[in-house]
Amino acid sequence: MNRLYHVALSPFCRKVRLTLAEKKIEVELVEERYWEQGPDFLRRNPAGKVPVMKMEGRTLSESQAICEYLEETVPTPPLMPRDPEGRYEVRRLCAWFDDKFNQEVTTKIMGERVWKKVMKQGYPDSKNVKSGLSKIKFHLDYMGWLLDQRRWLAGDMMTLADFTAAAHLSCLDYISDVDWDRSSNVKDWYAKIKSRPAFRSLLADQMSGLPPAPQYAELDF
Amino acid sequence: MNRLYHVALSPFCRKVRLTLAEKKIEVELVEERYWEQGPDFLRRNPAGKVPVMKMEGRTLSESQAICEYLEETVPTPPLMPRDPEGRYEVRRLCAWFDDKFNQEVTTKIMGERVWKKVMKQGYPDSKNVKSGLSKIKFHLDYMGWLLDQRRWLAGDMMTLADFTAAAHLSCLDYISDVDWDRSSNVKDWYAKIKSRPAFRSLLADQMSGLPPAPQYAELDF
């Protein structure tokens, strides 16, 4: 059995979970509270972070590398287009969300409001939260602009770029920090992706001591 | 003519420059002091960073997405193996250096010793420099361990993973912050990669007001 060591509200783990579920690859989820871990976890992944996947005797890490590997080995359904230009656009947007959005928004808001609490590292710094809440507007507008021209974020098909963006936004939505009224394009896009069977496991997530916001699992939000 | 907007000591730009040069794709280099830039640069790249490439009328950003695009459109010489396992390992290591190494070492050392000076943002914080100089040892040891088992970082052929690692290390070597005596494997690997024609343009780089360390361009270092 394949095994994914993960944390419920990690966008990087969620991106891999969505990809696995969409491709119907069965996997056992193992919660990895890596901040409490010792040498066992570091032996599994010297980078010291999640996700880590055990698959057919191999240990895989780095979410984008894992997703591209899954795309190459289990090509159906495809989550990347075939043409190099389309593939470039998917990868550019994956990097946009995993790098820029993550630094400007996810780590600022989730880092302060969730991880500090879970990891017992003190109280949220409201300056960071404010900065994240201000920056997310720019990103939602950018997504809205993309979706003005395209059915999905990277083009006419649903791709890893949509899963990457949805992975980050769904974590923020768990604590009700996404203003879905800002862009009807983005809201419609999220409603489409949220209603996929691949999303179900994410919507069932519960962090102990931190219940999800009421609309989190609602398909009509 | 293709155009690459870049900064001399950016590892992300260097990775793209190495890939372009290895594949013999001609490109005009344009220095982009993006921290002094206004709306023109942001129009070229809404992410507001380098590298940005103009190629056949298209504007490309995000170094890994650019390199994968070049690999798919100009496959000779190959910088990725053909098997999914080998490709996974290349991507894992690219992420290792662009993410983990960058955060723990490059931004700590280059950020304090070079970018604060160039961007006129004050004096280096010695705590960050010390932390970077301490962490780089762990990374050099990890590279040495990989190179104990492999000719190149990701396997038996030279790949994007080697270019990514060399891009970061070459920036640090410009200011003489790599201890090449720590691992003879790593030193031999860097000597091989440094002597490639693709590396020449990097070795000719000069930052105004910050001349390179004496051994920087020497093939025998």
Image (spheres, coloured by chain):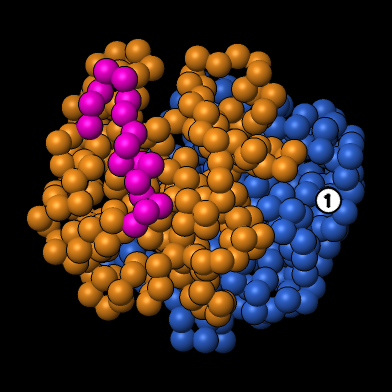
Chain colours: A orange, B blue
Q: Which residue is mark 1?
A: B155
Visible residue check, residue A141:
no
Question: Compared with residue A37, is residue A180 higher up or lower down, i.e. above or below?
Answer: below
Residue type highlighted by circle 1: Gly
Residue positioned most to the left: A181
| Residue displayed at 27% across by 78% down | A149
Dot 1 lies on which element?
Answer: loop
| Residue displayed at 69% across by 24% down | A43
User: In the rendered picture of this protein, how many numbered marks are placed on residues?
Assistant: 1
| Residue displayed at 29% across by 54% down | A194
Magenta-colored span: A196-212
Along the horizontal axis of the image, is A88 left or right of B47?
A: right
Q: Position of residue A201 (x, y in %)?
A: 38, 42
Q: Residues within 10 Å of mark 1 (few under 14, many from 20)?
A: some
Question: Compared with residue B205, is residue B149 higher up or lower down, i.e. above or below?
Answer: above
Q: Position of residue A106 (x, y in %)?
A: 32, 40
Question: Compared with residue A199, is residue B70 higher up or lower down, i.e. above or below?
Answer: below
Q: Is residue A179 magenta?
A: no
Q: Position of residue B1 (x, y in %)?
A: 56, 86
Along the horizontal axis of the image, is B116 left or right of B199?
A: left
| Residue displayed at 26% across by 71% down | A147
Q: Position of residue A109 (x, y in %)?
A: 26, 35
Along the horizontal axis of the image, is B10 left or right of A173?
A: right
Quadrant where the N terminus of chain A is found in the figure: top right
Q: Is residue A204 magenta?
A: yes
Question: Could you say which is closer to the camera, residue B103 or residue B112?
Answer: B103
Chain letter of the residue beneath label 1 in the structure image: B
Visible residue check, residue B78:
yes
Question: Could you say which is closer to the camera, residue A15 or residue B206?
Answer: A15
